[in-house]
């Protein structure tokens, strides 16, 4: 079977998007791993399957798979990619869409995909005071994140420290690990070790938002926060009550083609 696909990048966090509404398909774990292989497949951090929503009042649904074949409950960049795809496909700009566990509001405006983050829980569920000397926080923004402030982030040994914390036994099911350093008020540098990728990615939307919330908790920041990722700049918008959380940035359509499975 030949399947249409589009390769997108959300600040270097890249995904292969497949629209199940165009063809009723089912991908195995082996299919997903092969698609994401950067030498023998298309290459990507994951696969996005866009489908019809369960609730017809919503516009679409997405399921997200990591490059190891595991399913991600949420991914901010995958969501932004899906918003950009739907905006280009329909010429609309406002969307309600379903993930595996929640419903999100999306907007495509001035070339940017914007998502209102609707999941925030388990704040400070685990004590991580032993993991960093400058401070940090555990929380869940759709997927679990351990956020740690550090210095000299560019030269920081992220792979060693990230893998160690990701597999720490205190975190049931594991955790994503975000490291950040403050540039100035409202501006940070950011790097992330992602579970399911089992390594560093160029950007992570849920991680960016988890780090923004951490800055609110540690420094009482609110408003727009500029975040420098390996894949470029994105923005997080937070309010003082943590009720309105927005993640925004540009999405690039890399190429499209047909996939034989």
Image (tube, grey):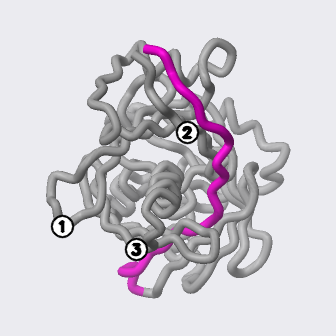
Residue at numbered disc 3: 94
Q: Quadrant of residue 92?
A: bottom left
Residue at numbered disc 1: 57
Quadrant of the image for the C terminus? top left
Quadrant of the image for the N terminus? top left
42 drawn magenta: no
- In the rendered view, tell whether residue 175 sits above or below residue 23: below
256 drawn magenta: yes
Q: Main secondary structure of the magenta part?
A: strand
What residue do we see at 46% from left, 53% from top? Answer: 82
- Would residue 160 be seen by someone viewing this image from the given angle? yes
Instruction: State the CA–CA distance, disc 1 to disc 3.
Output: 13 Å
Please provide percent x and percent y for residue 227. 69, 66
Mark seen at residue 6: 2
Instruction: State the CA–CA distance, disc 2 to disc 3.
Output: 21 Å
- In the rendered view, tell whether residue 44 sits above or below residue 134: above
- Would residue 129 be seen by someone viewing this image from the given angle? no
With 1 as the anchor, is 84 left or right in this view? Answer: right
Q: Quadrant of residue 198?
A: top right
Span of residues in magenta: 241-261
Per the image, label 2 sits on a secondary structure element best described as strand
Instruction: State the CA–CA distance, disc 1 to disc 2.
Output: 26 Å
Please tell me which of labels 1 and 3 falls first in the chain: 1
Please provide percent x and percent y for residue 114. 51, 69
Please provide percent x and percent y for residue 142. 36, 54
């Amino acid at each position: 079977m030949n399947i249409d696909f589009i390769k997108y990048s959300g600040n270097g966090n890249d995904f292969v998007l497949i629209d199940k509404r165009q063809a009723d398909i089912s991908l195995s774990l082996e299919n997903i791993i092969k698609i994401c292989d950067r030498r023998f497949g298309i290459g990507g951090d994951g696969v996005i399957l866009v489908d019809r929503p369960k609730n017809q009042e919503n516009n679409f649904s997405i399921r997200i798979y990591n490059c190891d074949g595991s399913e991600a409950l949420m991914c901010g960049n995958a969501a932004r990619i899906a918003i950009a795809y739907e905006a280009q496909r329909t010429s609309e700009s406002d969307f309600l869409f379903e993930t595996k566990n929640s419903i999100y509001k999306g907007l495509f405006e001035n070339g940017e995909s914007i998502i209102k983050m609707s999941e925030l829980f388990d704040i400070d569920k685990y004590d991580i005071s032993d993991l960093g000397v400058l401070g940090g926080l555990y929380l869940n923004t759709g997927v679990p994140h351990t956020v740690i402030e550090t210095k000299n982030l560019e030269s920081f040994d992220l792979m060693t420290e990230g893998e160690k914390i990701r597999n720490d036994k205190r975190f049931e099911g594991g955790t994503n690990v975000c490291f950040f350093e403050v540039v100035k008020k409202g501006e940070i540098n950011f790097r992330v070790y992602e579970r399911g990728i089992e390594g560093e990615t160029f950007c992570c939307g849920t991680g960016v938002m988890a780090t923004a919330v951490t800055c609110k908790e540690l420094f009482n920041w609110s408003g727009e926060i500029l975040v420098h990722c390996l894949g470029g700049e994105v923005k997080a918008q937070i309010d003082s009550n943590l009720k309105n959380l927005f993640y925004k940035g540009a999405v690039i359509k890399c190429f499209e083609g047909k996939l034989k499975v």
